[in-house]
Image (cartoon, grey):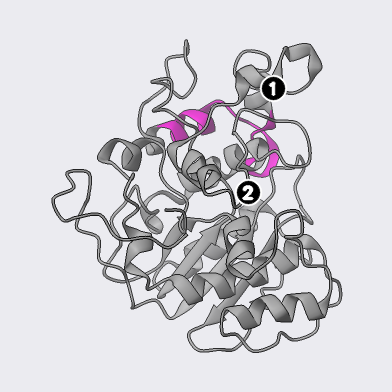
Amino acid sequence: MVGRPPPRSNPGRRALIAPDRFTRFAAIDWSGAKGHRHRGIAVAVCEAGDAAPELVPAPRGVWSRTDVLHWLREQADTPLMVGFDFSFAPPLVERGAYLPGEATPTTARAFWAYVDADCDDADLGAASFLERRRGVHFYLGARDGAKAQFLHLRRCEAAFNATGAGRASTLYDAIGAAQVAKASFAGMRLLYHLGPAVPVWPFDPVPAKGALIVEIYTTVAARAAGLRKGLSKLRDAAALDTALAAFGSRPHAPLTGYDDHATDAIMAAAWLRHVAASPELWHPPALSTEIRRSEGWTFGVL
């Protein structure tokens, strides 16, 4: 999915220089589950070079979303590029509003504040935000009507789907194993609470120093590793090492267990290190000024 950068005359382009200053890379497999601690969260980090990513131990054995927030604040001044596997904003371009009929902001950062102000869920959760709007904006089951009427996409999701490499989910579908809604709205709360401590691409320019957060989609990394559609999950040591080798990484240190969360984070961290300095990935042709402010973009999608 690597393409040619847009011409310099593109009016939607900002002066973003593909960074080669990052020397640490992290991928975070995220969770929107209810409660205070979440076995679905995994954090993997690698340094520049070819050493395999390693899992970061959770402060109290199992990560909470608040633990991740604190960990990010601690990394703010380091040359760390962090990839989060959730969608940073709902679609806006397709229908002109995030939640048509509701007086929502039109920029992502303002929408993060809007979501946070409407939630009192434990540990930065956001399930209540979706539940209060079920059947109007979010699909949570058959009684909400035909799912097809909720399947609205961001421009980056439509661009990924057009590649044939997989199918990105809509943020308005909040049911089923593939849904990303709860995780994404919980993630928006985290980004709001993080504030300016760590810039978030593409809403913010790439900083001259310190950490940076980008949105990733582990399916993009899986395709780059040569994994076929429907076979993207790595559930044993050999499969994980094969994927890592595709990104120039040495084999990983054995894990106590090979669940999707740990292996996705390890694979995605190695992929991020492998592609971070690719100029074309920082300049997707469709990334206009409006999309940059409102919907954002998934790093690695062209």
Q: Which residues are magenta?
A: 111-127
- Please, what is the three-letter code of the amino acid marked with disc 2? Gly
Under tag 1, what secondary structure? Answer: loop
Q: Residue at x 42, y 15 (%)?
A: 103
Q: Residue at x 26, y 40 (%)?
A: 289
Whether 112 is among the magenta residues is: yes
User: Along the polypeptide, which appears first: circle 1 or circle 2?
Assistant: 1
When the figure is inspected, residue 140 is found, relative to residue 234, above or below; the finding is: above
Disc ID at residue 166: 2
Disc ID at residue 160: none
Residue assigned mark 1? 139
The Cα–Cα distance between marks 1 and 2, rounded to whole angstroms, is: 21 Å
Q: Nearer the viewer, mark 1 or mark 2?
A: 2
Q: Nearer the viewer, residue 156 or 207?
A: 156
Where residue 82 appears, as percent x and y from the top left, is 50, 64
Dominant SS type (magenta):
helix
When the figure is inspected, residue 229 is found, relative to residue 170, above or below; the finding is: below
262 displayed left or right of 28: right
- Please, what is the three-letter code of the amino acid marked with disc 1? Tyr
Where residue 75 appears, as percent x and y from the top left, is 48, 69
